[in-house]
Image (cartoon, rainbow, N blue to C red):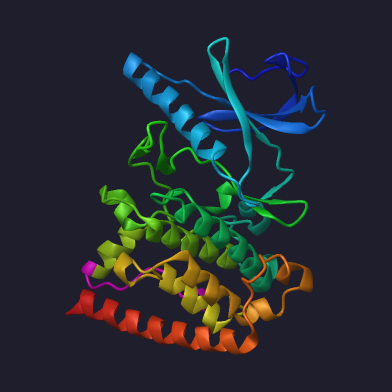
């Protein structure tokens, strides 16, 4: 896809100032809104198509993402202001996020996995709370939840204010302009982060995002991309054991409670995972890592969402009981 030169004005309003990022399906530019003077991001969608059917699918993909994002309002999701077509190109105007991808902050897959080169567990716990709140918001949409379907460190950006932003809703499952829920480009997965049901074509649900959340936290805390869920599944069926290395073996600074939560999120059979984002939030708030976060991070929670210490202890105890029960049931399911 040919990039647009700086200085070009789109829609007689947005002056391109540079390229913020480029992938296989889109280019993201920085631009100045000449009406308001603010900096915005403009996503140019690639309309790659060999046939009229492929072109129709690409256009539907663009419209799907635009409509999905435009209807959302959450501190951890970029706002979409408008979308338009110009000279056969399609553009999405949204918040410009000035920050770094979590994958770069964690050097995932770079080969240096020593804990001292990884983000502190307390920092990752704070990121996890923000990500989970965003998922809870998406999963709480009515009449049906929005499933993000591509959670991974490459789709998460930390801005200069310390907010973690969810990027790229291109394969999210949500409502179209007829009020129907659908997924464009079915079958797309990110190895290491996608749950087994996303490979098999089984309908995804909020628990699919929670598996990806666990895999994302595993990668941020260990510096390693987890093994593919289908490989883990095959290995267990063959009685060879789970190739997923225990998190604390890779990073002993992670608390046992945090490791248990990540492990519970990454259970292959979704009936035995943590069942919703609200439960994940309760478990995260009970972690010892959260007790060491700054007051500023703690006060970032919406009013009424912070638990008192006795309530945290009760929730944490209940969560551990649930975890042990789910683990036993899972082992029985696989080995009996």
Q: Residue furthest top?
A: 87
Q: Nearer the viewer, residue 253 or 325?
A: 325
Residue 112, horizontal then vertical, whole percent: 62, 62
Instruction: For the C terminus, give its image quadrant.
Output: bottom left
Q: Relative to 77, is 8 above or below?
A: above
Residue 334, horizontal then vertical, whole percent: 22, 74
Residue 286, horizontal then vertical, whole percent: 58, 80
Q: Residue furthest left?
A: 336
Q: Relative to 158, is 275 above or below?
A: below
For the record, the magenta segment spans 237-249
Q: Is residue 238 magenta?
A: yes
Q: Is residue 284 visible?
A: yes
* Residue drawn where x is 48% and y is 37% of the image: 170
Q: Nearer the viewer, residue 14 or 105?
A: 14
Q: Main secondary structure of the magenta part?
A: loop
Q: Residue furthest right?
A: 37
Q: Relative to 146, is 224 above or below?
A: below
* Residue drawn where x is 57% and y is 53% of the image: 153
Q: Is residue 92 visible?
A: no
* Residue drawn where x is 71% and y is 65% of the image: 300
Q: Is residue 233 magenta?
A: no
Instruction: For the N terminus, give its image quadrant.
Output: top right
Q: Quadrant of residue 269?
A: bottom left
Q: Relative to 76, is 186 above or below?
A: above
Residue 32, horizontal then vertical, whole percent: 78, 26
Looking at the image, residue 74 sits to the left or right of residue 20; the answer is left
């Amino acid at each position: 896809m040919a990039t647009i030169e700086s200085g070009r004005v789109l829609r007689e309003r947005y002056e391109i100032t540079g390229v913020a990022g480029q992938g296989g399906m889109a280019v993201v530019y920085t631009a100045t809104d000449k009406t308001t003077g603010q900096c915005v991001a403009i996503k140019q969608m690639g309309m790659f198509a060999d046939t009229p059917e492929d072109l129709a699918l690409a256009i539907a993909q663009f419209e799907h993402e635009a409509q999905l994002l435009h209807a959302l309002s959450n501190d951890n999701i970029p706002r979409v202001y408008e979308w338009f077509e110009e000279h056969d190109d399609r553009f999405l105007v949204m918040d410009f996020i000035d920050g770094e991808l979590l994958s770069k902050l964690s050097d995932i897959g770079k080969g240096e996995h020593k804990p001292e080169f990884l983000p502190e567990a307390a920092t990752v716990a704070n990121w996890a709370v923000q990500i989970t709140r965003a998922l809870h918001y998406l999963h709480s949409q009515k009449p049906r939840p929005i499933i993000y379907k591509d959670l991974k460190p490459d789709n998460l950006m930390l801005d200069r204010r310390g907010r973690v932003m969810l990027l790229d809703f291109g394969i999210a499952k949500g409502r179209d302009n007829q009020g129907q829920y659908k997924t464009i480009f079915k079958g797309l997965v990110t190895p290491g982060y996608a749950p087994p049901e996303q490979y098999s074509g089984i309908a995804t649900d909020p628990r699919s995002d929670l598996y990806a959340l666990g895999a994302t936290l595993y990668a941020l805390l260990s510096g390693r991309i987890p093994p593919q869920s289908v490989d883990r599944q095959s290995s267990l069926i063959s009685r060879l054991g789970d190739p997923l290395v225990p998190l604390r073996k890779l990073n002993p600074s992670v608390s046992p409670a945090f490791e248990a939560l990540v492990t519970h999120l990454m259970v292959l059979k979704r009936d035995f995972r943590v069942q919703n984002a609200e439960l994940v939030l309760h478990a995260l708030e009970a972690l010892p890592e959260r007790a060491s976060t700054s007051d500023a991070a703690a006060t970032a929670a919406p009013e009424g969402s912070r638990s008192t210490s006795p309530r945290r202890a009760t929730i944490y105890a209940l969560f551990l009981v649930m975890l042990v029960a789910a683990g036993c049931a899972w082992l029985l399911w696989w080995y009996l």
